[in-house]
Image (cartoon, grey):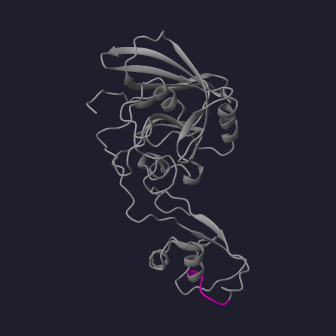
Amino acid sequence: MIERGIKPSKLYLPHDESFVGGRLIDYLAAHFSHISLASWQRRFDSGLISLERGEPLKQDSPYLAGQTILYYRQVENEPIIPFEPNILHLDEHLLVVDKPHFLPVTPSGRYVSQTLLAKLRNHPDLQQLAVNDISPLHRLDKDTAGVMLLSVNPSSRACYHALFADRHIHKTYHAIAPTRSDLSYPFHIHSRLERGEPFFLTKTTQGEPNAHTMIELIENNGAFSLYRLTPVTGKKHQLRVHMASLGMPLLNDNFYPTVKPKGTTDFAKPLKLLAKSIAFIDPITQQARRFDSQLRLIKKSN
C-alpha cells in the first residue's frame, strides 16, 4: 500500500496488559507521545491506519495484541520543496535522475512527502514501475544537487549496491568556493573524520586518516572559483568539511565552518555543490557506463 508515494511503517502490537481491551488509538497516542491524539484521529479518519492486508482501521478499533498494523508518517506543516527531479535514464535495472538542491532523498525529520523518493513514485513518467521497487542505491545530502542512481529491479539491486560497498564507483563533483591560488592542483587532502556534535555534523580529529579528497581548479573567477572534487572515500559531509578546513568553505554552506540558525534556508541561495558525474563498470553487462548531471553551478551573490 502506498499513499502519495510514501511507504507505510509497520508496528507490531505487543501484549501490553494496560491496553488490552482498550482502543488502538489510545495505545498509539501513548506509544508516540510526541504525536497528539487529534493527529491520530485525523489519520484514522483519512484511512491512513490499516491492517497489513490493507483494511482501514477506525478510531474505535480495539487494541489487539499480536497484530501488526500499517501507518503513514505525517508531519504538521511540512515545508514544500518547489523543485522536481529530472529523469536522465531508465532501463530494466537502473533509474538515473538529477536531484535538485534542498530535496531530501528519503523521509526524515520534517520531510515525508517532500522527498526525492516520494516525488519519483508519483512521477507521471514512472507509473509503469512498481513503486516499491524504486530504491536509492546511495546517499546524497539534502543540500547537494546532481546525478543519483536508484534501483528499479529488486533481483539486480544487490550487485549494484556492491559497487558502492566495494568502492567501484567513480564520482566527481563541482563546487564553487573561495579561490586559493597558492595551492598546487590537483591538491590532495587526507584527514580523519568522525561524527561531530550536534549529531548531524562531521568533525576533523587526530588519528590515522580515513578520508581522502582530490581537488582540481577548473576555472579561476576571481574571489570565487569553480572546482572539481573527487572523493576517494565517502565519509558524511567529506567534501564540505575538507574544503572548509582549507579556508575554502563552499558558497552558501549552512553547516561549515559555522552552523547557521535553523529556519534560514533560502531557495535563492543553494549550496554550491553538484554531483556532476558517476561512472562504473556495469556488473551485469560488464560495459563501462557514465552518467552526467545536466545541471550547472552559477555564481551568485551570497
Tell me the magenta residue range: 21-25
Q: State the residue at coordinates (31%, 38%).
A: 269
Q: State the residue at coordinates (42%, 20%).
A: 227
Near-viewer residue (18 or 274): 18
Please say whether residue 56 is visible from this viewpoint: no
Name the residue furthest left. 301
Is 124 contained in the magenta span?
Answer: no
Q: Is residue 298 above or below residue 109?
A: above
Please say whether residue 251 is visible from this viewpoint: yes
Q: How many circles with numbers are drawn on the protein?
A: 0
**Is residue 12 shown left or right of residue 26?**
right
Near-viewer residue (162 or 28): 28
Quarter of the figure that contains the N terminus:
bottom right
Is 22 contained in the magenta span?
Answer: yes
Q: Is residue 164 above or below residue 68?
A: above
Name the residue furthest bottom. 21
Percent across and percent down for residue 221 are 31, 16
Q: Main secondary structure of the magenta part?
A: loop
**Is residue 40 shown left or right of residue 265?**
right
Quarter of the figure that contains the C terminus:
top left
Percent across and percent down for residue 185 are 48, 11
Q: State the residue at coordinates (44%, 29%).
A: 293
Residue 260: which quarter of the image? top left
Percent across and percent down for residue 32 are 56, 72
Percent across and percent down for residue 36 are 47, 76
Residue 52: which quarter of the image? bottom right
